[in-house]
Amino acid sequence: MRRFVSLSLMAVLAAGTLQAASPVLTRKALEQVTVESINDGIPSGWCGRAILSILRKSGLGEGLKGGNGQDWEQILAGAGWKPVRVNSPRSAPLGSVLVYLGDSRLGKKPRGTPGGYHGHVEMVALAPGGGRLYVADCPRPSPGGTVPDNFTGRAWVPPKTMLATAPPINIQVETVLEERLKMASGFFDRGTTELAKLSLPSDAKVATE
């Protein structure tokens, strides 16, 4: 079975001439991925488990299974994902998944970190309000975790059919956030009305923070 998966991966890589293009997910979805990474409760060092959780909750988990970070190219290829050749993780499409090998697979002495032994996997996402992040077990401003030099040189994107059927990310969370925004707006509107009723000296200042 492992030999079959390896041959399938080789075939996908041989045919992988896709160009880095537009984001895989919407901006709102990319920001929600980051929120999910912060709140999923998965401890640092468990990037494989975290990325599986993120992809499933994003509606992109079809055909995926768990594995160590360095195993995720085979996992993604087996589920129909396609590789995009990129010069560095920083030029990978937003929403794509990046894989880094463990040191032993590259003939290096393991550097004593989870990534050094088992590799790393992450998704390119956005911080709420903007800013590129690399997320898995936690959001990071720089790619690669502890093994940034072990990048495979490929960014993985899901099949178009999977994107066409993917539901909005955590619609319940979005609804709650919208409701809270309305409540907050109502609160401050009432506060402004109350403030207008007060008789203040012309040189008085009202604290707003």
Image (spheres, grey):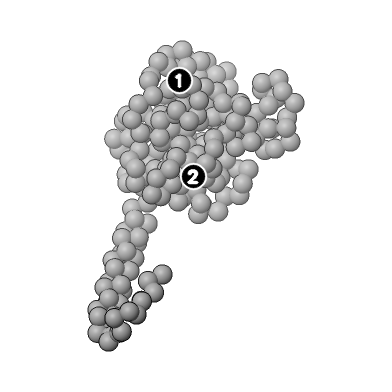
Q: Is residue 154 above or below residue 10?
A: below
Q: Which numbered disc, 1 or 2, marks the residue that appears first in the sequence?
A: 2
Circle on res. 53: 2
Residue in view at x 41 percent, y 36 percent: 95
The residues bearing labels 1 and 2 have C-alpha atoms spaced at a distance of: 25 Å
Residue wearing tag 1: 85
Residue in view at x 60 percent, y 37 percent: 145
Q: Amino acid at mark 1?
A: Arg
Residue extending farthest bottom: 199
Q: At which x and y percent is residue 42?
A: 57, 50
Asked if residue 57 can be seen in this view, the reply is no
Determine whether, in the image, residue 5 is placed left or right of residue 181: right
Determine which quarter of the picture holds residue 45. top right
Check disc 1: other Cα within 10 Å, few if <14, some if 14-19, many if 20+: some
Determine whether, in the image, residue 103 is placed left or right of residue 94: right
Asked if residue 100 can be seen in this view, the reply is yes
